[in-house]
Image (tube, rainbow, N blue to C red):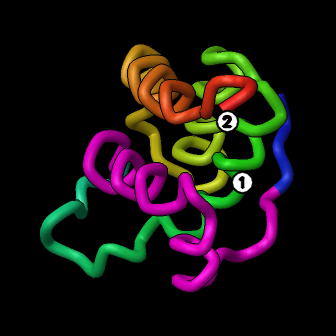
């Protein structure tokens, strides 16, 4: 599966969207494929916040979002320590942020 990198996310954009802060926290604390949470600036994964939000809003499945997270870590970042099970757990948490229709 191939994904194209999407537009960069600024700090203002990250927190302007209602889901921005929560998505950022999950990516930074739960996903963190390079293991820098707590030791590097917390903007390490900012570029992925809006693309993840867009996927949530489009109604992508847990498996689709997990595949995107895996692609980011392995293909886009070039890491070899991808963990599909972990990506599914993180994707489930991300999808739990989606507002219920009619709210």
Looking at this view, is 92 or 1 the one in front? 92
Q: What element carries label 1?
A: helix
Q: Residue at x 24, y 63 (%)?
A: 36
| Residue at numbered disc 2 | 68
Q: Which residue is drawn at 42% across and 51% down?
A: 22
Give residue 5's position: percent from left, percent from top: 78, 59
In the image, residue 7 sits, relative to residue 73, either above or below, namely: below
Res 34 → quadrant: bottom left
The answer to whether residue 16 is magenta is: yes
Give residue 89's position: percent from left, percent from top: 40, 20
Looking at this view, is 26 or 45 the one in front? 26
| Residue at numbered disc 1 | 51
- Label pair 2/1, CB-CB below 8 angstroms: yes
Q: Is mark 2 on a helix, strand or loop?
A: helix
Looking at this view, is 100 or 37 the one in front? 100
As drawn, is 43 to the left or to the right of 54?
left
Q: How crowded is mark 1: few (under 14 residues within 10 Å), some or many (20 or more)?
A: some
Highlighted range, magenta: 5-32
What kind of secondary structure does the magenta stretch mostly adopt?
helix
Total marks drawn? 2
């Amino acid at each position: 599966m191939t994904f194209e990198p999407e537009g960069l996310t600024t700090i203002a954009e990250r927190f302007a969207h209602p889901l921005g802060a929560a998505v950022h926290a999950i990516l930074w604390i739960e996903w963190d494929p390079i293991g820098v949470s707590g030791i590097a600036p917390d903007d390490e994964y900012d570029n992925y916040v809006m693309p993840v939000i867009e996927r949530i809003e489009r109604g992508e499945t847990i498996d689709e979002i997990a595949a995107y997270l895996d692609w980011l870590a392995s293909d886009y970042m070039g890491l070899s320590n991808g963990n599909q099970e972990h990506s599914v757990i993180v994707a489930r948490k991300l999808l739990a942020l989606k507002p219920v229709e009619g709210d």
